[in-house]
Amino acid sequence: MKDIYELLNDINIDENEFKEMEVSELEKAKVKNTLKRSINKKRKMKSWKKNVAVASILVSLSATTFGLTFPAYAKNIPVIEDIFRFIDNGRTESSIDSNDVKDEEKGLYYNYKKFSNEINITKESNGVKITVNDAVFDGKTVSITYSIESEQDLGENAFIDSPDIEGVGAIGGSGKTTKIDKNNYVGILTLSNLEETKLDIANIKWDIDSIQNTDNQTKIQGDWNFDFSLNAVDSTMQISDSSSEQNGVKLNIEKISVTPMSFIVYYDQIVSENISNKWDGVDVELEIKDDLGNVYSGEGNGGKGTDSYNMSLSKTFEKLDENATKLIVSPHITLRDYNSDNYSSVKVSKDGDEREITLPEKSGKGKEEFVLEDIVIELKK
């Protein structure tokens, strides 16, 4: 039986009658990886089922475009050169001229590849290859990109343990893994030093002993160990000590650190006793723009404090416009109660026994939102 490509070649089509269909970079990346794998196996395909599996990746392009736009589309499929940008917004090429990309499309990690270190260390265990691709340290946060190749499906969002920063006891962070093809993934991890000590070098120790398929809660056990060091990129620090307060919530901007690819805002969240007695939780979200009209996207690095109300935190934002002279910080406050839809109770396990502890009920119901007065920070040049 002919494979799908031979069948397409047998169709007589006037290409002038059709238009190519716009697809996202994520779809392109997925198709490229599938094509690469399927072409290598082309001569081995004997059964109808295998041919259907190869063709199924194109279903999302619609029945109309299936045999029409594919020839022109296939030859232009890009490679994922920059995982930082891919995680941000699906872009796969690191060579795209920044002048051709709108500011709102760039994202937090748009400039990270340029200032990162190529690690390119691969470890294989139990049918799974994990590669640490690139990493960068801005003096506060380590950002690491990685890729996974597996002999079996790991679900839509494979979960792996986070690394450690040697000598740092308090670490915050986040992670994201994206499936780009059957059994192939790319991801990014961030680790933030929550302690006051400043590091010039981050020594990373990443010992992974399992990968979890979060779809079915199964695990693949293995041994993937990585050790590497990162020098902090050049940065400048500016002390701020500016604050805004309203309705029992105060936000104080301590300092700002500016690096070649980002800037970090360090701030304190201070909540009055009246608010903490009434509400279960207080969320502070910083929105930042500059005097040129640029609006900056960012990601929280976590924090620490005496309780969940009074915290010292930081948030990393995308590259600062070098022509900006002011930052305008708008603190958005949300007061919440924990109800049956979220944090009504917690399970505690001890000696194999589980029990539920119901959280104390407070008078605040639903949520209350307000915005503190803007904090304007003059940038030092």
Image (tube, rainbow, N blue to C red):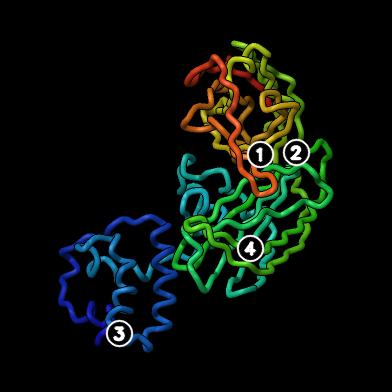
Check the image and report above or below for 372 versus 316.
above
- In screen coordinates, is 56 left or right of 372? left
Q: Amino acid at mark 1?
A: Asn
Residue 298 location, x and y as percent?
A: 58, 37
Q: Nearer the viewer, mark 2 or mark 4?
A: 4
Residue under label 4? 210
Residue at the spot x=39%, y=67% of the render?
Answer: 31
Residue at the spot x=28%, y=64% of the render?
Answer: 59
Is tag 4's residue or tag 1's residue first in the polypeptide sequence? 4
Q: Amino acid at mark 3?
A: Ser
Q: Nearer the viewer, residue 68 or 345?
A: 345
Location of the C terminus by quadrant is: top right
Q: Nearer the viewer, mark 1 or mark 3?
A: 3
- Element carrying mark 1: strand
Q: Amino acid at mark 4?
A: Ser
Q: Residues within 10 Å of mark 4 (few under 14, many from 20)?
A: some
Residue under label 1? 301
Q: CA distance from mark 2 to mark 4?
A: 26 Å
Q: Which mark is residue 277?
A: none
Residue under label 3? 47
- In screen coordinates, is 218 left or right of 39? right
Q: CA distance from mark 1 to mark 3?
A: 51 Å
Q: Residues within 10 Å of mark 1 (few under 14, many from 20)?
A: many
